[in-house]
Amino acid sequence: MLNKNKSNYIKNLSFYYIEHFSKFIQPGSKRIGFSRFSDKIEITAFKNPDNSVIIILLNKNDFNIEYNLKINEQILHDNLDSHAIVTFNLKL
């Protein structure tokens, strides 16, 4: 974003989040339910028209967070860096 006299700009992180979402979430997708144990990681999930499932995690904290993601009976254990966003594209 540029200021009024166009002499300086502001980097808006939400632009990058929207760009990230648009790469994976297809037109006509439906938001699907999920549950979470902690509010330290933001999460959302969508089912695309091609039946793929998109899960997006966002760490808005100044520290890394370990997490477990359970999908059906499978569990994924990983680490999400501070201020990182990660997307899982699942073909179920």
Image: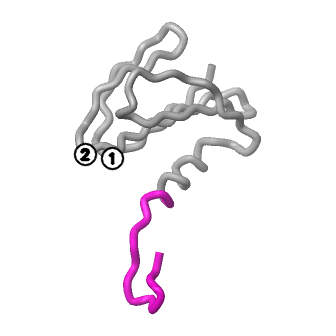
Instruction: Examine the rendered structure and indicate whether residue 23 appears above or below residue 43.
Output: below
Q: Residue at x 71, y 37 (%)?
A: 29
Taking depth in this image into account, of 69 and 35 the one nearest to the observer is 35
Relative side of 64 to 27, left or right: left
What colour scheme has been applied to the protein in the rendered image? one colour
Tell me which segment is drawn in magenta.
Answer: 1-15
**Residue designated by label 1:** 83
Secondary structure beneath dot 1 equals loop
Question: Image check: 28 left or right of 10?
Answer: right
- Determine whether the residue tagged by mark 2 lies in a helix, strand or loop: loop
- Identity, as a three-letter code, of the amino acid under mark 1: His
- Specify which label sits upstream in the sequence, 2 or 1: 2
Q: CA distance from mark 2 to mark 1?
A: 7 Å
Q: What residue does disc 2 label?
A: 62
Q: Position of residue 40 (x, y in %)?
A: 35, 33
In the depicted structure, whether residue 38 falls above or below residue 10: above
